[in-house]
Image: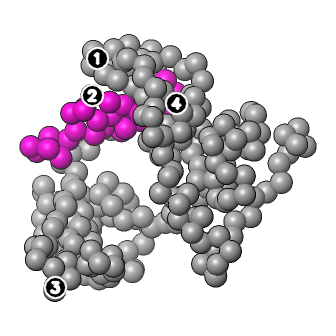
Amino acid sequence: MQNNTMVQDLLAPTGMSGMIWDEAGGVANLDFFSLVKLAKLRSKQIGYNHVKQLSGWPADIHPFVVSPHFKAPPQPRFCASKVPKSVSSLKRVGSAVFEGHHCLILQQSARNLGSVGNMVDRFWWDVHTHYIWKEEDTIYPPPSSPNPPSRQVTYVKWVRPMKRPPADVFRFPAGTRVVVPGILGNLPVPPGGIRIKPPADSSPYLGLSFTAQLRYLESVKGTKNEIHYTIPKPDAKHK
């Protein structure tokens, strides 16, 4: 939120499952989970190892973060606009009416963020629909820190069901820069968009930078903290 205006929108143009559109910055690019799905598709088409090679991911390090074997966090995922299957792990700390909806205020156990402090997440959970209308994340710094607590609030003002529009009617505001990594192939940019290459510090094929993650995985190789992943054998046609 900037000045009470939402500046990021989740879009679904040209048949993709989602794009992040930074309206204030005038830039659009693939959201992470859309990239995961696209990597799965390309792995079926040209082979998983080929996708790894094009992405610049070292052959001796796993996981390939957008591999076809990547799994999203297990349910329930608590955040605004979600309907969790269970809230048994949350503690009730109050109740309130939000935008006309009767909600229980539920809280997760504090999470230790190391030197940053502790984070406490609260959720406004609709007692009738089980929809989360509001999420409040508060970071409490260590006692030795001069910084005050910081808070981020995400909420849903309204819900308006919409059918997915056909791709040929989607258009960006004129001049919107659209990041088009190599994994998208020759996919045309919707009207109003200007096709641009990924930033220089990212993978030209994926459009993302994994420098920090690669550095971490390199640091734990061969140690007791090494994370092991099982990659299924490729299909015969991809060998």
Q: Residue at x 39, y 80 (%)?
A: 88
The quarter holding residue 93 reads bottom left
Distance between the alpha carbons at the discs numbered 2 and 1: 8 Å
Q: Position of residue 2 (x, y in %)?
A: 14, 44
Q: Nearer the viewer, residue 236 or 58?
A: 58
Distance between the alpha carbons at the discs numbered 4 and 3: 44 Å
Distance between the alpha carbons at the discs numbered 4 and 2: 17 Å
- Which disc number belongs to residue 175? 1
Three-letter amino acid code of the residue under disc 4: Pro
Q: Which residues are magenta?
A: 1-30
For the residues bearing labels 2 and 1, Cβ distance under 8 angstroms:
yes
Indicate left or right for 112 with 5 as reference. right
For the residues bearing labels 4 and 2, Cβ distance under 8 angstroms:
no
Q: Nearer the viewer, residue 128 or 177?
A: 177
Which residue occupies the extreme bottom position in the image? 143
- In the structure shown, which secondary structural element does the residue marked by tag 1 occupy? loop
Residue 122 lies in magenta, yes or no?
no
